[in-house]
Image (spheres, rainbow, N blue to C red):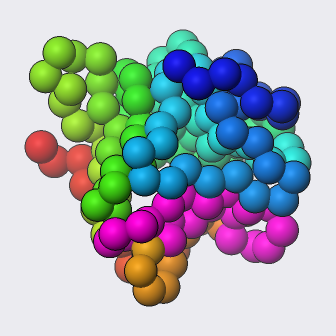
């Protein structure tokens, strides 16, 4: 795993693999593992150590979490990786690496951005406009819906 970067994660995320003063991002090939996240000024996008939930946190307060179409929280995530082709893929620890939650709408050179400076704090940026966004209040907006049916 990557060495912990500076930052104060919360809510079951024990270390920051990337930290930025205004922005932290995962680029193609980069990933977070269970218990780690990316952090910036009190905000964390990470996978909880205990139940393996992908969450957006402000301090210890959960603002958003990855869910299925029925609103159920996705559990047992071991890794989320920003793939070179533009998909953000979260998998379990099974040897077959079962996909649990996927955003597949970024295109080449996409990245996940955590930015605490405006109303949209998490976004997936691709070749054109932001495809997936989460506002500071936890509301998802944008044109990309996560896939959980595999």
Question: Which is more toward the observer, 93 or 83?
Answer: 83
Answer with left or right where residue 110 lies relative to residue 13: left
Question: Which is more toward the observer, 129 or 52?
Answer: 129
Q: Position of residue 59 (x, y in %)?
A: 82, 38
Q: Position of residue 29 (x, y in %)?
A: 41, 45
Confirm whether residue 142 shows in the render.
no
Q: Position of residue 102 (x, y in %)?
A: 30, 50
> Is 121 placed above or below 88 here?
below
Q: Position of residue 149 (x, y in %)?
A: 16, 48
> Is 22 placed above or below 75 here?
below
* Residue displayed at 33% across by 45% down: 89
> Is 37 placed above or below 26 here?
above
* Residue displayed at 83% across by 31% down: 6
Quadrant of the snapshot with the C terminus: top left
Q: How many marks?
A: 0
* Residue displayed at 76% across by 73% down: 119
Answer with left or right where residue 111 lies relative to residue 72: right
Dividing the picture into quarters, in which one does residue 66 lie? top left
**Residue 138 counted in the magenta span:** no
Confirm whether residue 118 shows in the render.
yes
**Residue 107 counted in the magenta span:** yes
Question: Which is more toward the observer, 66 or 86?
Answer: 86
- The residue stretch that appears in magenta: 106-125
Looking at the image, the residue that sits furthest to the bottom is 128
Answer with left or right where residue 133 lies relative to residue 93: right
Dividing the picture into quarters, in which one does residue 44 lie? top right
* Residue displayed at 59% across by 24% down: 2
């Amino acid at each position: 795993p990557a060495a912990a970067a500076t930052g104060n994660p919360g809510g079951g995320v024990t270390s920051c693999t990337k930290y930025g003063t205004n922005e932290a991002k995962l680029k193609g090939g980069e990933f977070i593992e269970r218990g780690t996240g990316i952090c910036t000024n009190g905000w964390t996008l990470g996978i909880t150590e205990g139940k393996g939930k992908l969450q957006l946190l402000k301090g210890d307060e959960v603002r958003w979490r990855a869910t299925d179409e029925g609103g159920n929280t996705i559990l047992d995530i071991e890794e989320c990786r920003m793939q070179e082709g533009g998909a953000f893929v979260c998998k379990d620890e099974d040897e077959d690496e079962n996909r649990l939650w996927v955003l597949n709408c970024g295109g080449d050179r996409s990245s996940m951005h955590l930015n605490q400076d405006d109303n949209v704090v998490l976004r997936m940026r691709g070749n054109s406009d932001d495809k997936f966004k989460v506002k500071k209040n936890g509301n998802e907006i944008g044109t990309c819906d996560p896939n959980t049916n595999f």
